[in-house]
Amino acid sequence: MKKTRISAPGKLILFGEHAVLYNRPSLVAAMNQRLFFEAEKISENRIIIEAPEMKVSDFSRCLKDLNKEQKKEVKFILTAIKNFFKKYKVETGLKIKTQSQFSAKYGLGSSSAVTVCTIKALAELFEIKIMEKEIFNLAYQTVLDVQGIGSGFDIAAALYGGVIYFLTGGKIIKPLKVKNIPLIVGYTGIKTNTSEIVKKVKGEMQKNFEYYDKLYDGIAQIVEKAKTEIESVNWLEVGKLMNENQEILRRFKAPSLKYGVSSKIIEKLIGACLRSGAYGAKLSGAGVGDCIIALGNNKKKIEWAIKKAGGIPLLVEIDYQGLKIENL
Ligand code: PMV
């Protein structure tokens, strides 16, 4: 029966995490490690999923049970399917297979990549013409259904690729004119629970609104400057702005967050990068664990420093290709 294969890139947030949840801009980038997604219509009324990177094999769910609580590992796929069926008034059984070039534990956006792939694959299978912004809206709705909160920056990166100026909920999605950024990425070895950190920060913000509002305004100003400096290929300045953004993230207050949304291992990796000549370095994402990013021209030296400090350098670059239909 009809079959399709789609792929989407992973992502990194360069500037503006957390603040982007509260109507502030951010800068995000797609990475050249992709998630591949194959879907085939089947005659049975069920969804069958194989997702080895999520350790899911032979998963099967009846179409009539799509509204029930779903297993964590397949939640994004099933919720995206449910939302698509509802919006376009269609339905079919499906056999799905995913294959990822990056581990889901790195926080490089496997959930957003799989969500946009699911929606595009269904549009292909049902021969429905779907605009990119419609994919964004449906995918963003899916993320909100699953996580309750999220800015949608990861969806934009998976969908459009490249480097993007992004405002909360996709109110602005603007590609930056930049060929490449000398980025170095290091994994801390710790998986971040984004929703948990976001909720903690939100709780604190409700107690101390003005304090956080000022931090977010500070981040927003850095984002605006960074946009200009990136487009001017002024890496020294961009590095300085990364350090300034990191300094604000250290000032986040919440119980059990000793270093703001930074952490001991993040600080260790950042310190190692700066000592080896990086122009700047900061956490990327919700913080505490996942990845750090650094900027510098001596990539090899900085990667080695990350390794020595206990992190894992990830050999990634910016991917200018977003969501894509692949050959079968
Ligand atoms: O942890 P990540 O890579 O999913 O990034 C989270 C970034 C936040 O701003 C904290 C949340 C969001 O959805 O923008």
Image (spheres, grey):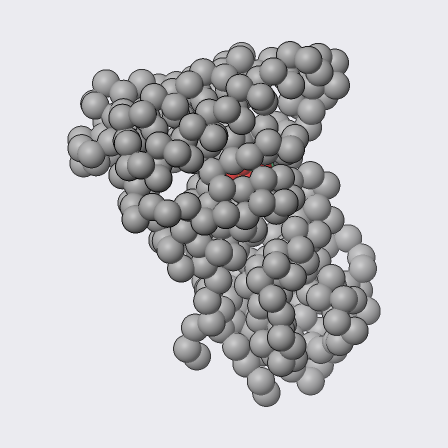
The quarter of the image that holds ligand 1 is top right
Residue 208 in which image quadrant = top right
As drawn, which residue projects farthest toward the bottom? Answer: 1
Instruction: Note whether residue 67 is visible.
Output: yes
In the image, residue 32 sits, relative to residue 63, either above or below, namely above
Q: How many marks?
A: 0
Residues 238 and 18: in front is 238
Residues 319 and 191: in front is 319
In the image, residue 112 sits, relative to residue 256, either above or below, namely below
In the image, residue 55 sits, relative to residue 238, either above or below, namely below
Q: Residue at x 44, y 21 (%)?
A: 246
Q: Residue at x 60, y 66 (%)?
A: 131
- Image quadrant in which the N terminus is located: bottom right
Q: Is residue 286 left or right of residue 274?
A: right
Q: Is residue 180 left or right of residue 288?
A: left
- Image quadrant in which the C terminus is located: bottom left
The spot of residue 96 in percent (x, y) is 57, 70
The spot of residue 186 in percent (x, y) is 34, 34
Residue 94 in which image quadrant = bottom right
Q: Is residue 105 left or right of residue 228?
A: right
Q: Residue at x 23, y 18 (%)?
A: 275
Q: Residue at x 68, y 28 (%)?
A: 199
Q: Is residue 183 left or right of residue 118?
A: left
The spot of residue 213 in percent (x, y) is 64, 19
Instruction: Note whether residue 311 is visible.
Output: no
Residues 11 and 135: in front is 135
